[in-house]
Image (tube, rainbow, N blue to C red):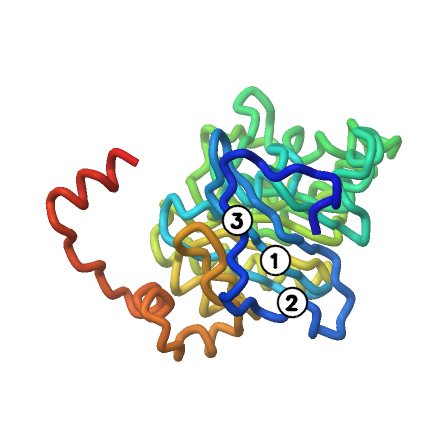
Amino acid sequence: MSHPNEAPHPGATPRPSAAPRPDTTADPREIILECRDLSVGYDRPILEHVDLTIARGEIVALLGGSGCGKSTLLRTIIGLLPPLAGEVVVFGESMSALSPDERSRLLRRTGTAFQQDALFGSMTLEDNIALPLRELTKLPARVIREMVRIRLALVGLPGLELRMPTTLSGGQRKRAALARASILDPELVFCDEPSAGLDPAVAAGIDETLLKFRAALGVTIAVVTHELESIRTIADRGVLFSHGGIRAVGTIDELTRSSDPAVFSFFHRVADKPAATTSTASSIAS
């Protein structure tokens, strides 16, 4: 929870006391990521009072429509954006209580595959994926080359070490980004929209790669997505964000059968009813 002496962000709204909240402490497995009463955003909150946990070995999908705050939450969790209130606890350590060096060391136990892949266009695939090893370890060059070769084979890109990113397809670039995110053998991997913009067949290949990662490497995965087929294929649990906070948490089967209008609409692709012109204009303006 927030530090007792910490003042809430001026843009944050008071936490509602009457609304029931999900029990996030019931999972008996080791919790390796926890958000405690977390509010995230920029000039004002986008998501508020987020309480969630991720247990070791899970694949958890962070769900919701475009603009609901999924990626902003992810940026806050991995330390790219400071929280407006609350705290993030990773491997039992509160991120806000750590020095920059301590936080950096802790985050080395995690990996992140960004939505836009973030590959360096002037570097070969081998050099892109080897970069964390060269920057953060003292492994011999031959060992690094072999590790890159093995990881590329794991993500379905064998023999492409010397290719440049510009010569790869969108799906191949996503796979390469996953290879780099996992090259330090992290315990927890974050993926931001890994199948966005890909055709269904290529997206299915990314899903298979994520499942293979968990089976082969034993990693825990938090994936930001709104792709229903991917969600149903890979996720153990889903966390649905709507209207500035967590709307529902559960297995994908539980969420699919939910009678909550927002949850039902998301999982059954029910279009929102058109609002009145004035309301729409007000919404856009806000």
Amino acid type of the residue that numbered disc 3 sits on in the rendered structure: Pro
Above or below, 16 against 131 in this view is below
x and y percentages locating residue 88 in the rendered image: 69, 47
Q: Which residue is mark 3?
A: 14
* Pick the front one: 134 or 27: 27
What residue is disc 2 on? 24
Left or right, residue 197 beside residue 91:
left
Question: Residue flagged by tag 1: what amino acid is it?
Answer: Asp
* The image quarter in which residue 60 lies: bottom right
Residue 77 at least partly seen: yes
CB within 8 Å, label 1 to label 2: yes
Q: Are marks 2 and 3 in contact (CB under 8 Å)?
A: no
The residue singled out by tag 1 in the image is 51
Q: Is residue 101 left or right of residue 253?
A: right
The answer to which of 45 and 180 lies nearer the viewer is: 45
- Residue at (35%, 57%) from the top-left corner? 200
